[in-house]
Amino acid sequence: MGVRKDLKRAKRRTDLAGRTRVETVRDERGVVREARTAALAARQTTGSTADIPFTNAAEAPDAVILRRERHGTWHPVTAAAFAHEVTAVAKGLIAAGLEPGDRVAVMSRTRYEWTVLDFAIWSAGGQTVPVYATSSADQVEWIVRDSGARYVVTETAGNTATVTAGTAAHPRAPRLWELDAGALDDLTALGADVPDEEVTKRRTALTPGTVATVCYTSGTTGRPKGCVLTHANLYAEAANTVELLHPIFKEVTDQVASTLLFLPLAHILGRTLQISCLMARIEIGHCPSIKPDELRPKLRAFRPTFLVGVPYLFEKIHDTGRATAEKMGRGASFERAHRVAVRFGEAHLDRFLGRGKGPGPGLYAAWALYDLLVYRRVRKELGGRVRYAISGGSPLERDLNLFFYAAGIMVYEGYGLTETTAAATIVPPLSPRPGTVGLPVPGTAVRIADDGEVRIKGGIVFGSYWNNPAATEEVLDDGWFTTGDLGSLDEDGYLTITGRTKDILVTSGGKNVSPAVLEDRLRSRPPVGQCLVVGDNRPFVAALITLDPETVAHWLSVRGLPADTPMSEVVRDPRMRADVQKAVDYANEAVSRAESIRAFTLIEGEFTEENGLLTPSLKVKRRAAQEAYADRIAALYA
């Protein structure tokens, strides 16, 4: 398989393998408490992120840096054309009255116009305030009021109505444009008389320390806080990850790097991925949805060579493979393929890392058989050319990671927050270690406090929360950002995240339980959709579990049951409960008896953004879910 050939070829390139230098610091007991990785990119001293399109246009005007979909066809966009479009929209913003330092809110799903707007806002001297397209009127009201955004660009008429309703009581309503109604054309026409030199003047006045964006946390609890990120923050993240990853990709593969961006651009990971790709002149396309049924056709058409996603994507691709096999009467074969993949991936990686002999002849033969029957179908689901992927947002279940590795796709995990400008750690390309979230991003340090909390320091760490000095003071201490996550560092400085400090449950018996471990494993097994582990001040641990609608439809089909069977009947069906119990048993394998899930209840509905139980980054809002299902939780302990 290509990914394993890449690793073998890369292993011979000691100059690449030695580029990441990690220093570890131990405490008096010899436990690693801090890991630091030297920067690969020099610190930015002049200019800003806004310069990227214009540098590309000057150095490689004909290079294709984006592909834009129109009527089902992907059309190339050159560096020169992109810079010209950015300039035209920037001129329109200036003509509309945008002054240097003004903020522009963008409420849209991921699409080409978002990218143009981001760089146009910066080039006009402004600051971008991303807003999730699914935000409510109350959320929009808060973000626009708190940030002081004088201008808002929406995607749809529905978004426009939400903004209008949310800001109706504001003393001064923001000026609105709508992408679906031709916002970029309107701005281009508005700025026709503004000289290009005015854009150049404003852009070149920006410095690394200039505020680039106020990015509001999606947060599982409390009101969103605006993270103030500078152009230096964005540069530190993008430049160092490009220097870490791109040279290796170019040297050890025969592919030209390209990716389909489907993460929300309102999320900092999507934004920094986009900046990184434009900086490295890696072709990118846009897809507005992460829903598998909507994303898969785009992947097959665009055929990217690498992806950046969240565990949900990889879980659904795996579940689709299982469902397809079951429809063909080969469900047991898929389960064997999964077990073979995990054993093969583990053995192969052990040999690569010098820890074992690798797969034996029998395991190789089994892998070859299932590559024909199963694994190649997984590759096809992702477009057929993907060899690498990065997963972030929450931990990816280790066996699932090994499954994709055996299928020819290396999934590297990373970890970060909005306050760290996305990734603070990432698994280095030549030293994979499934189950961890990797080493500090070059130029970054990670420290484990006495209570196990993860702290981060470096050029990627934000400087403050917007209009909230008290909250800033709570999380920043001498440049160290207190993440609220719990973790540990291994002997080589690899970080493993074990939970969140605020999520720790303490049973009435005094047992501390991190729900993240159980929830991550539960979600990786069908028919589970979302879940919430509970048990704080209770005698044992329990769980609220929702069922994945696609899995339920498949479950009904293979059992010959009507497709319109009410969910109230599905959740009571002993066969469904038995299938869920298997997922619960799998989750319990990772913890002690005292930490295991003793009871669960199946919820008829779903946790969604629309009902306020899921954040746009697909994390459960714990407090909201506990309040919504308080009676069901109480019944578990009756």
Image: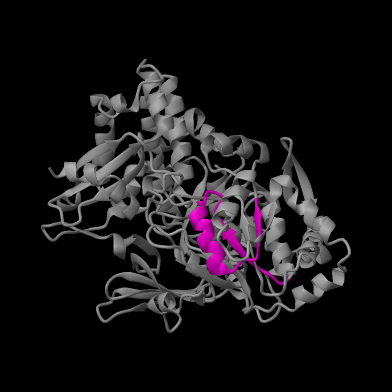
- How far across and down, in percent of the image, does residue 345 sit? 42, 45
Q: How is the image coloured?
A: one colour
Quarter location, residue 554:
top left
Residue that appears at 32% across and 49% down: 625
Horizontal arrangement in the rendering, residue 40 relative to residue 193 (left or right): left
Horizontal arrangement in the rendering, residue 92 relative to residue 420 (left or right): right
Q: Is residue 138 magenta?
A: yes
- How far across and down, in percent of the image, does residue 277 sit? 66, 58
- How far across and down, in percent of the image, does residue 360 sit? 39, 41
Quarter location, residue 83:
bottom right
Residue 456, relative to residue 343: is it above or below? below
515 or 317: which is nearer to us? 515
Residue that appears at 47% across and 43% down: 314
Residue 122, relative to residue 323: is it above or below? below
Is residue 37 among the parts visible in the rendering?
A: no
Horizontal arrangement in the rendering, residue 450 relative to residue 320 (left or right): left
- How many numbered circles does the render carry? 0
Is residue 90 among the parts visible in the rendering?
A: yes
Residue that appears at 37% across and 56% down: 355
Horizontal arrangement in the rendering, residue 574 relative to residue 291 (left or right): left
Residue that appears at 78% across and 66% down: 54
- How far across and down, in percent of the image, does residue 578 sit? 24, 30
495 or 517: which is nearer to us? 517
User: Quadrant of the image for the C terminus?
Assistant: top left
Q: Is residue 8 magenta?
A: no
Residue 379, relative to residue 448: is it above or below? above
Magenta segment boundaries in residue numbering: 125-154
User: Quadrant of the image for the N terminus?
Assistant: top right
503 or 104: which is nearer to us? 104
